[in-house]
Amino acid sequence: MRLISWNVNGLRAVVKKGFTDIFWGLDADFFCLHETKLQAGQIELDLPGYHQYWCYAEKKGYSGTAIFAKEEPLSVAYNMGLPEHDTEGRMITLEYPEFYLVCVYTPNAQDSLKRLDYRMSWDDAFREYLTELDRKKPVIICGDMNCAHEEIDLKNPGPNRGNPGFSDEERAKFTQLLDAGFTDTFRHLYPDLTGAYSWWSYRGNARANNTGWRIDYFLCSDRLQNAIEKAYICPEITGSDHCPVGLDIDRTLL
C-alpha cells in the first residue's frame, strides 16, 4: 500500500505545472494534499479510480487539505470537531477496517512566533485527537507539520533556533506527540541520514543548494512499525516549495 503526501502550496498553480502526470506517475493508493488554497467548485480534477475528499478553509485562498483514495472508506471526518480549530480546513480523517488515515496541515507559528499560543493549543488538541483514534485502531498520519523536529532535520539549525518551525516549544510538542505512541517513519528507517529535506525557501537559491527543512512527515502508531516497507522523500519533483513524501506499508501486517 502506497501513500503520498504533498504540500502543493496552491493546487491550481501546480496543476499548470504537471500535477496530473506526477499524480499518475507516483501510483499511490492514497494521495494527500496540503495547502490546496481552494474553495469548493474552484477546480475539477478527473482522477478515475479515486474517491476525492476535500476540506476547505473559510478564508479564501488559504490552507485546505484533500485526499484522493482508491478505496472508499468506512467513514470520513473533517477537522477535529472543535470550533476553535475547525475553520481553516486543516484535517481529513478516513477510516478503514484496519486503520485510520489522517491528513493534516499544521498551523504555522508565523514570524516572531506571533501565532505560537494558538499553535500550542492546536498541538495539544491534535495529540489528544490522535490518541483517541489510536485507542480504537492504528493510525497513519501524514502532512506538513510545520516543525523540523531535530537538528538533523534542517540544514542550518543554529541560526534558525527559535524561528517558526524550529522553536523549542514546537519541537517539544512534536516530541510529546511521538512519546504518546507514534513513530516518525522516515527517521525510523534512517535515523542518521543528513541532507534529507522536504521544504526549501524560494529565497537565496535554497533548493539548488539543498538548504532545506524536513517538515513533511508520515507518522504511524508504534505498533505499525513492522509494517513499514519504505519511507522516502521525492526532491526531484518540483512545482511547489515542498516536495512529496511517501510511505509504503504492508497492509497484510496491519
Image (cartoon, rainbow, N blue to C red):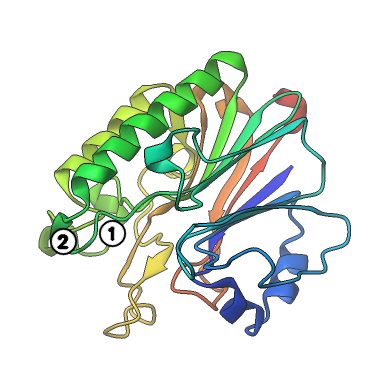
Indicate the position of residue 101 as horizontal and vertical percent values: 62, 37
Task: Tell me how far mark 2 sits from mark 1, CA to CA.
Answer: 9 Å
* Three-letter amino acid code of the residue under disc 1: Leu
Can you say which quadrant of the picture contains the N terminus? top right
Can you say which quadrant of the picture contains the C terminus? top right
SS for callout 2: helix
Viewer-nearest residue: 129 or 32: 129
* Three-letter amino acid code of the residue under disc 2: Asn
Q: Are marks 2 and 1 in contact (CB under 8 Å)?
A: yes
Residue drawn at 30 percent across, 51 percent down: 148
Viewer-nearest residue: 249 or 107: 107
Q: Nearer the viewer, mark 2 or mark 1?
A: 2
Residue ranking furthest to the right = 48
Q: Earlier in the sequence, mark 2 or mark 1?
A: 1
Residue 160, label in figure:
2
Task: For residue 29, say whether it is visible.
Answer: yes
Quadrant of the rendered image containing residue 156: bottom left
Image mark count:
2
Task: For residue 174, say whether it is visible.
Answer: no
Indicate the position of residue 19 as horizontal and vertical percent values: 67, 75
